[in-house]
Amino acid sequence: METADDAKIRLLSILVPQLGPDEAIGSELRFGDGRYRADLAIASTDRLAAIEIKGPRDDIRKLEAQLSGYLEMFLEVSIATTRDLLPGVRAIAPRSVGLIDITSATPQILRTPKARKLLTKAAAAYWFRTFELRNILQSKGIRSHDATLTELRAMTVGSLSVDEINQLALASVYERLRTRHTAFVEELGHTPTLDDLRILTLPDLILATNEWPGGKHGN
């Protein structure tokens, strides 16, 4: 039976040629204080997309909770799934969510995701690592030496406009993906392999588990 990695490799074969010159793709991107992990993510300074893979062995009853997190934290979201799971996925996913059929050897895009223009300020703040929050606040002349992570986020939300915080958040995610994406492209042959996928896979780091905009849902 096909594994999630097999599905990722086939998805990469159609996604990578479509990437813009300033876009980066990554695998297993954690978000929401580590409560979620995007199977595949694409980032640039003006794009933040996620793809959730649902294969034959997955329980789609978890999908509704997962989608609430994805839709809070990404500008566009797609679900890649098999033909037999599509009716159940369609019943759960809003029409703004893209659909990809991964039943055949070449995945087929059934519905293009509808992209939002901006994250909420609260959601955008959850993409920053602690040192990035401190740097932002320092650039605004705001002292934050003794602040907790929750306080740092609140202070950052209060000090930036929605456009500013989105610009910085997307840049943060893009930089997180860019180095591995560059190495992936340099090693990539005619078609992606498991070794190529491993290059794209981000370290399994869990961030602090504070309350976040999408609630306390698990993977």
Image: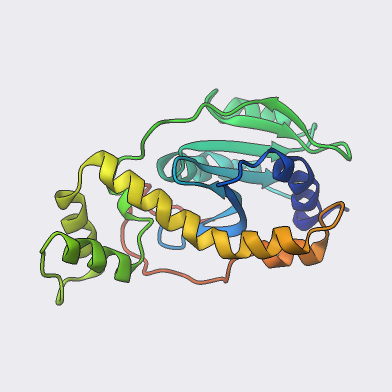
The image shows a total of numbered marks equal to 0
Query: Is any part of residue 187 visible from this angle?
Result: yes
Q: Going 30% across and 53% down the picture, which residue do you hit?
A: 125
Which one is in front, 13 or 50?
A: 13
List x then y, in percent, for residue 106. Answer: 85, 37
Report x, y in % for residue 75.
46, 38
Say which quarter of the image contains residue 142.
bottom left
In the picture provided, is 93 more to the left or to the right than 56?
left
Q: Give the left or right position of residue 57, taking residue 140 as reference.
A: right
Position of residue 108 measured from the top left corner of the image (x, y, whole percent): 78, 31
Q: Is residue 81 above or below residue 27?
A: above
In front of the other: 20 or 12: 20
- Quadrant the C terminus occupies: bottom right
Residue shown at 63%/59% (left/top)?
181
What's the colour scheme? rainbow
What residue occupies the far bottom of the structure in this picture? 146
Image-based side of 92 in relation to 172, left or right? right
Residue 133 is left or right of residue 109, and the answer is left
Up the image or down, 120 lies above or below 154; here it is: above
Residue 151 appears in the picture as rendered? no
**Residue at 87%, 36% in the rendered image:** 104
74 or 216, nearer to the observer: 74
**12 versus 177 height, above or below:** above
Q: Residue at x 60, y 36 (%)?
A: 78
